[in-house]
Amino acid sequence: MKGRWIIVAVLTALLVALLPVPSEAAALPRFEGFATEFKLEGSNSYEIWVSAYAPRHNGEGWISLVVAGKHATAFYRAPALVIGEAARDTTATAVKADLGSLGRVDLLLERSGTEEPFRWPCGGPRESYEPGTYRGVFEFKGEEGYTSASASEVRFDPLPFFLAHGCGGSGSGEARGPGSPGARLKGVSFAHDRILTFQVNKNNRHSSVIYSASLREQRDGVQIYRTIQGTAGPGAFSFDRDLGKATLSPPAPFSGSATLRRDPDSLLADWQGNLKLAFPGHTIPLADPGVHVGIEHAHLTRSDDSSVGVSFRAAERAAALPMKAR
């Protein structure tokens, strides 16, 4: 799984809800919500990690899908009916959701009747869970056909979520100031009822280019958060020593190019071109009039030897926020 920089849609609270209640708390039973998670293989080398959770007895909750590729991810969140048997455990026995043009979910759990043990990858006591199989309909088709998956049977098995990743942390840092030989170009747009951000870094004229971008939007009641990150050769981003001019022309998933020019007498940089970025399921122009960019000297450091859980949780929080509140 190494190399997939973001993966697995499992909320920390959702996972905790699957654990048995300690004996000392048995005298004070507390409803923890109904939850489930499973994984499917999508077309075009994408993996689809699904979680569903309802904090209420009536089953009103949500379903989340993380569609993860090697360098790009699309996160979807929609209302769902998630029902269980509170007297038995917190595992969801039924999940139903309308994803609009993206598909639908209508699954019922067939329990195995047996318990299987496991240990948390980062330590902790020995636990157990009851595996099973969801039967019914799962259909997902990503926008522009970037991936799809369908199934009439899906195994409920949380172990891949727990065991597929390490326990480390990740991080990055950026120093900014005129003393740096590198540069950072950063753009943002709030046009078209969506939030677009992108950033490109190059630590010196001969170093590789590091880029990242995100797109938040909502379609048919489904909240969507798309992300991309990667690297490109030195020629993808060029700039003058005084940052008066810069050109961005990276390879796929980008297309086209754009040029930034800074006038000392103007507060805003001039940003023009035909540069586009192909997110999973949505290609976005990056040089539209509604896109605002800035450039400054900077040096970026980052660590990739880590679990990707923090990146997922950031995506989960971002997708869960109402558009008007971001």
Image (spheres, helix red, strand yellow):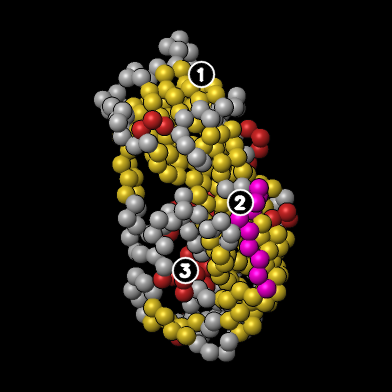
Relative to 7, residue 253 above or below: above
Rendered-image quadrant of the C terminus: top right
Q: Determine which residue is flagged by label 1.
A: 270
Q: Determine which residue is flagged by label 3.
A: 161
Q: For the residues marked 1 and 2, what is the alpha-carbon distance in whole angstroms?
A: 33 Å
Any part of residue 242 in sight: yes
First along the sequence among labels 2 and 3: 2
**Identity of the residue drawn at 60% across and 24% down:** 289
Q: For the residues marked 1 and 3, what is the alpha-carbon distance in whole angstroms?
A: 46 Å
Q: Residues within 10 Å of mark 3 (few under 14, many from 20)?
A: some
- Tell me the number on the disc at residue 200: none
Q: Locate residue 54, reporting x and y percent.
A: 62, 67
Q: Secondary structure at mark 3?
A: helix
Q: Closer to the camera, 35 or 298?
A: 298
**Identity of the residue drawn at 39% across and 74% down:** 120
Amino acid beneath label 1: Asp
Rendered-image quadrant of the N terminus: bottom left
Amino acid beneath label 2: Tyr
Q: Locate residue 304, reporting x and y percent.
A: 34, 52
Task: Read off the magenta span.
Answer: 142-152
Amino acid beneath label 3: Phe
2 and 3 marks in contact (CB < 8 Å): no
**Identity of the residue drawn at 28% across and 27% down:** 181
First along the sequence among labels 1 and 2: 2
Q: Secondary structure at mark 1?
A: strand
* Residue 267 part of the magenta-drawn span: no
- Tell me the number on the disc at residue 146: 2
